[in-house]
Image: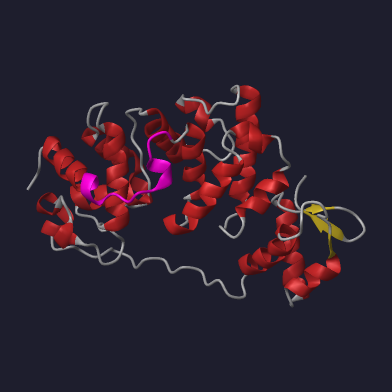
Amino acid sequence: MAARPEALHEAVLDWYAEQARDLPWRRPGTSPWGVLVSEVMLQQTPVERVRPLWQEWLARWPEPPGLAGEPAGEAVRAWGRLGYPRRALRLHAAATQISTGHGGQVPSSYDALRALPGVGDYTASAVLTFAFGARHVVLDTNVRRVLARLLHAQPAAPAYQRVSERASAAALLPGPQQAPVWSVALMELGALVCTPRRPGCAVCPVRDWCAWRLAGQPAAARPERRRQPWAGTDRQARGRLLAVLRDRPAATPAVSQAELDLAWPDPVQRERALRSLVADGLVEALGGQRWGLPR
């Protein structure tokens, strides 16, 4: 049965007030820079892996000019083993643009945020909402799944429905005072309860109105895509090579080819991985068969 938006708002917001995780970037007083850093770090990465690194990052670089004033390689080094290290380069580039073009302050307009390196629609919308309290639609994977099930009886949200998803999300968005909390509450509901596999429908605050549950939880039309294995892949080879460079002290950054050769046994795959790291701007050739992080 359909529910009035106000009933959904009350149910989800009450649930969030009781069940929300205490995450440092959600705490009062977090700067817009802190929110931006958290959103970039959380892309395709579990919360518990992000939490300690976010705290270290903000302790070292509490504002964008601090990061912009250091070599890009330091951002890669500080990124550690979080994964997808190009995000570190994008954050460094964004910090530089914020410092030179916005007086060192994260901009508060959608267009200015979208113009920052590595900032797409979701990240810009999230920063506007969570850092500046804007009334803006925020669509991440969790929110899309919750709305697909709640409103359309679909087990997941197909990519081709982005326009209709945005319209549905906008129609449910409450007023300015509640909108930011509603957005983060929907994300939390998708992360903790309305999960991709084995959703906790019995404890879901909107179970009585969920079209997917009332339809008998129909399965996806196509099986979910399997994740690519990690062991032996080029991604693992890249990670091993980058770890050698990242673990080298900043005072002596050069790494010899012989050291990289020890990091991965297959010479063909090693060379391919190294070339891709150079192409991505994560590694620089220093001459004389030596390599280092970007300067």
Q: Is residue 199 left or right of residue 282?
A: left
- Which quadrant would residue 224 be assigned to in this image? bottom left
Q: Is residue 35 left or right of residue 148?
A: right
- Residue 50 placed where, x, y %? 49, 54
Q: Pick out the residue farthest to the left.
A: 1
Residue 59 against residue 260 in the figure, above or below: above
- Which quadrant would residue 283 be assigned to in this image? bottom right
Residue 43 against residue 223 in the figure, above or below: above
Q: Pick out the residue farthest to the bottom.
A: 265
Residue located at (28% from left, 45% from top) = 186
- Residue 153 placed where, x, y %? 19, 54
- Please state which of residues 253 and 12 is positioned toward the viewer in this rendering: 253
- The magenta-colored residue range is 16-29
Question: Quick check: is 28 in the magenta stretch?
Answer: yes
- Please state which of residues 51 and 75 is positioned toward the viewer in this rendering: 51
Q: Is residue 9 left or right of residue 163?
A: left
